[in-house]
Every structure is written in structure tokens, then in C-alpha cells.
Amino acid sequence: MKRNRTKKIITFLVISFILIISIKAYGQIKIKVLLPREWRSYTHVKSMVIPDRNHELYGFHHIYVNNKGLKALLSKDEFPQRTIFVAVFYDVEIGKDGSLNQGKKLYYLLMIKDARAEETGGWIYAFFDRDGKYIEKDVEKECYDCHLSAKDSDYVFSKFIK
């Protein structure tokens, strides 16, 4: 009888351990997304350029937001779930006259408001190559750490420029 009870306790502990490990592993699964096909129909929010090739965000940036996000951006409210920002980065070409011109497409960055992304302030961050193929990145280190400085604006740097 004592042996049977010990066996049940050990079985319970093993199952509990496996369950805890499984839940912890599930929480660490990265949420992968696709680049929205309709991103070109989003509203253009702003453009900017970082001409320094040594800067991690080098290039021409064009920022777009979907309709859900646009309403919040204009009203300065918190962004609703499924707000989507797409940033398209292009190479910088310097003209003979010293002008900065947009060159070939480099890559895309994506932000989606999603409550499941608790570790990154409720936003999913994703990278895509110039053809729209997903690129694995450490989004906590490469995106969220920087966006922490914009916590007061729901982790969003972009402001709508009329």
C-alpha cells in the first residue's frame, strides 16, 4: 500500500514536471507572421532617411499603417489589437549633385499589435527580406529594447505627418 502511494506521488510529480516544462516551452514559441499582401493600400504615415551605412537602421524608411492603427494614430489613443505598421527600407544613393535618392529595396519591418506578445509590450515584430520572405531575428534585442523608449506612445515612434 505504501509502495503504491509512493508510485502515485512519483507519477504525479513527473507529470507535473513535464506539464510545467511544456507550458514554459509553449510560452517561448515565437509568433511568426506573414507580410500583409495589402500593405500598399495602408496609409503612408511618414518617410525618413538615415544615410549612415554603419547605422543599424540605414536607408530610406517609408512607414505605412492599416486603418485600425490610423484611427488611433490620429486620435493619439492606444492602438487596438491587429494594428499593423509596415516599414519598407531602401538603399540610399547619393547623386552627383549631393542629393540623397532612394535606391533598391532592402527589407521590410513589421509591427502587429497582439496581446499574446507579452514579452514585447503587446507587439509582434518581424523582419522580411526584399522579396517578403520571413527572416528569423531576436526581436526582443533588435526591436523591443529600442521601442521601450517609446512606451508612453504605446511603443510606437511614428507620428502622422499631414
Image (spheres, rainbow, N blue to C red):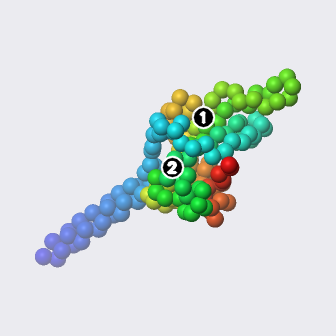
Q: Give above or below for 2 relative to 10.
A: below
Q: Are marks 1 and 2 in contact (CB under 8 Å)?
A: no
Position in image of residue 12 (x %, y %):
25, 68
Instruction: Check the image and name the residue furthest to the front.
Output: 162
Q: Is residue 152 left or right of residue 124?
A: right
Tell which tag, 1 or 2, sits nearer the viewer.
2
Q: Does the image show residue 97?
A: yes
Is 80 left or right of 92, judged from the image as shown? left
- The amino acid pointed to by label 2 is Asn
Q: Which disc number belongs to residue 67?
A: 2
Percent of width and height locating residue 71? 54, 55
> Extreme bottom residue here?
2
Q: Mark 1 points at which residue?
A: 107
Residue drawn at x 64%, y 65% as measured from the top left: 152
Where is residue 64? Give x, y as percent: 58, 43
Amino acid type, residue under disc 1 in the picture: Tyr
Q: Residue furthest top?
A: 96
Which residue is drawn at the image coordinates 59% and 61% (left, top)?
75
Camera sees residue 54: no
Image quarter (top left, top right, bottom left or bottom right) of the N terminus = bottom left
Q: How far apart are marks 1 and 2 (CA)?
A: 23 Å
